[in-house]
Amino acid sequence: MGTPLVTSRIPDPDEGIERPAGPDAREACAADGFLKFFAQEWTSHIVLALARHGALRFGALRRQLPPGLSARVLSARLKALEAAGYVERRDLSGRVLHVEYSLTPSGLAVDAALASSESLMSASLSKIGQKETSGS
């Protein structure tokens, strides 16, 4: 069997919400939960930082991120990413607390997808800019 979908462990953000039944009910997009999960503020920044710098301790990871990110929010996002299977938390403690975070193979796949999206967006913005300057 093939590799499981990257979205397989993401909880449905709309779980518990009643949807109308019948022919008028619209099917949710298969990527809806994934997109909502990664649309949370700072989540994609965390994936990017771990992809670019490898395994990082909490403080080092926080220094790689924009200064507006609080330790509380970073901790919550890391827990969510770990629960979804995108981040691995390794406890390397001896006498001193030492925890490292790194991307799992699914997390690396998400980073590649985000990088592709960024390239697509850049190309689209470039085309839009060319149309505006050509006087369309």
Image (tube, rainbow, N blue to C red):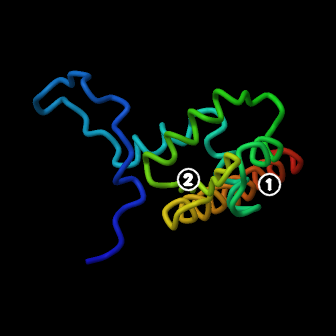
- Say which quarter of the image contains residue 83: top left
Binning the other alpha carbons within 10 Å of mark 1 as few (below 14), some (14 to 19) or many (20 upward) gives: few
Q: Dot 2: what SS?
A: strand
With respect to residue 10, does 8 lie above or below?
A: below
Decide which of 35, 119 is in the foreground and name it.
35
Side of 32 where 68 appears, left or right: right
Q: Residue at x 21, y 22 (%)?
A: 18
Q: Residue furthest right?
A: 133
Query: In this view of the protein, which residue sits in the foreground, 114 or 46?
Result: 46
Neighbour tally class for label 2: few under 14, some 14-19, many 20 plus, Cα within 10 Å? some
On-image quarter of the C terminus = top right
Is residue 61 shown left or right of residue 20? right
Give whichever of discs 1 and 2 has the lower sequence position.
2
Outermost residue toward the left in this view: 22
Q: Which residue is mark 1?
A: 126
Under circle 1, the secondary element is helix
Q: Which residue is mark 2?
A: 89
Residue 4 is situated, as x and y percent measured from the top left of the image, at 34, 65
In front of the other: 48 or 34: 48
Instruction: Give the foreground label among 1 and 2.
Output: 2
Picture coordinates of residue 124, whole percent (x, y): 70, 54
